Amino acid sequence: MTFFKRPEWRRPHWMLALLIAASTLVPAYAAVQPLDHIVAIVNDEIITRQELARRYDEVVRNLSRQNTPLPPRDTLEKQLLERMVTELALQQHARTTGVRVDPTQIERALQRIAAQNKLDMAGLAAALEKDGQSIDSMRTTIRNELLIARARERDVDNRISVSDAEIEGYLQTQAQQGVETEYNFAHILVTVPENASPEQIQARRARAEDILAQLAAGADFGQLSASYSDAPNALQGGAFGWRPSGKMPALFADALKPLQPGQVSPLLKSSNGFHILKLIDKRGLDTTLSVTQTHARHILIKTNELTSEADARNRLLQLKERIDNGVKFDELARLHSEDASASKGGDLGWINPGDTVPDFEKAMNALQPGEVSAPIQSPFGWHLIQVLERRDQDVTQERQKLMARQAIRERKAEEAFQDWVRQIRDSAYVELRPID
């Protein structure tokens, strides 16, 4: 049994204590039955052997579809259990700090998943059942992912700032380097706990060096990632996909630059721990500086405790009916929109590709000039969108600055996210128990 940071005042409460005791008391008549038991305690919640087994089966199916060699079962189970512990700690943090998920959003996410797979809800349920899952388990997964995503947005993403001086410095560096290079790479991370002792740091370094030695001996990178990496994408073989050099930590960009496809970096050390990178491919990134801009306006209705998703959508349906009957869009926007653009009749000005969230941009791009959308949902609420006109525009300088801002922001956000995850995991009371 392993203990992590267990101050006396954080012992499990009495209900959890009863569960723990009950899990160790097996009636004689049930001795031949396969029993569930607790494999981890995270603050005041538990993870059971059956939950771990379900997660294991799911990951094995995914790895098999990717033709990734499977790690030994005990190795993968330990990796999965640690991941489940971290996820549960993040979910608990989100709930206890006020994050809530509207059930309507979960249903809409399910509908999008079904549509992406060209299925109706019944077809999605059948496909999930074939994979050993259920609609209810998918709902739980979506709810938990939304909890973590919203907590991240509030605690990490919304606190990232980029100065004009950083943008100018980035652009100067890019000019000196010439055409930016884009890398397709994979990543293994061995984290180091915050305030780790020299002995802990050395132990984690030894683990990372052992992984590097296995890679040098010809081991499969994806298999070692699934077995040992602490990164969020470990079970996807550590794959990052294509990333411009400016949208990754400088540590990564510098390490990837001299590599040829198929080569692995030396061991890299950052504040998060030890990293190993594998370069899959690289290419020059040609940035298009002439873009199609859209001049659009919108009406936004936000959802909250007083305005449900259905209420917001119905209000916009009524406003659209009035617009279709001749009422001016800008007049209704001034009266009803809850966006800062309301005073300008909802006018958003000229919008470049990527300036808005994907749901909004997709709906806007489907409209002809003069056309008004049906109510569409985004993370900000519900919108009516009207496209006024479009044009092709040379936005070289403006676009370069925008891309620089986005690249710096993404890099800072990723680094801050890893720190945030580590802090929450390290501050949780965690007790790991034998899996078998």
Image: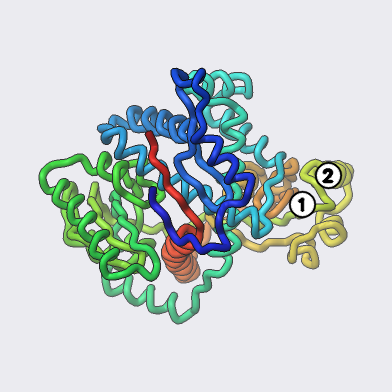
Q: Residue 213: percent from the left, percent from the top? A: 14, 51
- The answer to whether the residue labelled 2 contacts the one labelled 1, judged by CB atoms less than 8 Å apart, is yes
Horizontal arrangement in the rendering, residue 198 relative to residue 319 (left or right): left
Above or below, 222 relative to 257? above
Residue appearing at x 25%, y 54% in the figure: 277
Quadrant hosting residue 200: bottom left
Q: Kindly tell me whether residue 387 is visible in this rendering.
A: yes
The residue shown at (31%, 36%) is 74
Q: Residue at x 44, y 18 (%)?
A: 32
Considering every residue shown, the one lying at the far bottom of the view is 165
Secondary structure beneath label 1: loop
Q: Is residue 277 left or right of residue 59?
A: left
Figure disc tally = 2
- Quarter of the image that includes the C terminus: top left
Numbered label attached to residue 270 = none
Q: Which residue is mark 2?
A: 311
- Which one is in front, 394 or 416? 416
Q: Report the colour scheme.
A: rainbow
For residue 204, what is the image quadrant? Answer: bottom left
Measure the C-alpha gap from mark 2 to mark 1.
8 Å
Mark 2 surroundings within 10 Å by alpha-carbon count, few (fewer than 14), some (14 through 19), many (20 or more):
some
> Is 252 in front, or is 37?
37
Q: Which kind of residue does numbered mark 2 sit on?
A: Asp
Q: Which mark is residue 303?
A: 1
- Disc 2 is placed on an element classified as helix
Q: Is residue 38 left or right of residue 12?
A: left
> Which residue is at 72% across, 51% downward?
381
Sequence-first tag of 2 and 1: 1
Q: Position of residue 167 (x, y in %)?
A: 44, 75
Instruction: Specify the quadrant of the image occupied by residue 418.
Output: bottom left
Check disc 1 and give the amino acid type.
Answer: Thr
- In the image, is 217 to the left or to the right of 284? left
